[in-house]
Amino acid sequence: MRLTNVKDVQKFIQVVNECEHDVYLKSQEGDVFNLKSSMSQYIAIGRLIEESGDSLELFADSKEDEARLIRFLCELDDEHAQEK
């Protein structure tokens, strides 16, 4: 799933940390960051802020974690729509 408009980075990291299995962020250049690793989180968040997330894709190892992330992203979309 492609990331867009993740403004609340702390909430995003909180949702990732709640996931049971690994969660990855992949750049267009092919860089893959395991967001369950604190070091990778710092690097990935820098990329997320730098690129506004538009060119980054999010993957989860489990369907349950994927559903959790989709719910979070849907909530962000709803918030963004209400701001307009």
Image (cartoon, helix red, strand yellow):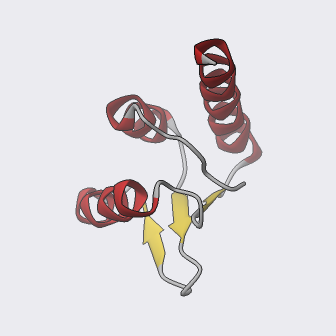
**Percent x, y of residue 70:** 71, 36
Q: Is residue 35 above or below residue 65?
A: below
Q: Quadrant of residue 68?
A: top right
Q: Quadrant of residue 80?
A: top right
Residue placed furthest toward the bottom? 29
Residue placed furthest toward the front? 84
Q: Is residue 12 above or below residue 54?
A: above
Q: Quarter of the image containing the C terminus?
A: top right
Q: How many marks?
A: 0
**Percent x, y of residue 16:** 47, 41
Position of 48 with respect to 77 (left or right) is: left
**Residue drawn at the location 67% of the way across and 28% of the way down:** 77
**Residue drawn at the location 52% of the way across and 63% of the way down:** 25
* Residue nearer the viewer, 83 or 62: 83
**Percent x, y of residue 74:** 70, 28
Position of 1 with respect to 40 (left or right) is: right
Position of 83 with respect to 15 (left or right) is: right
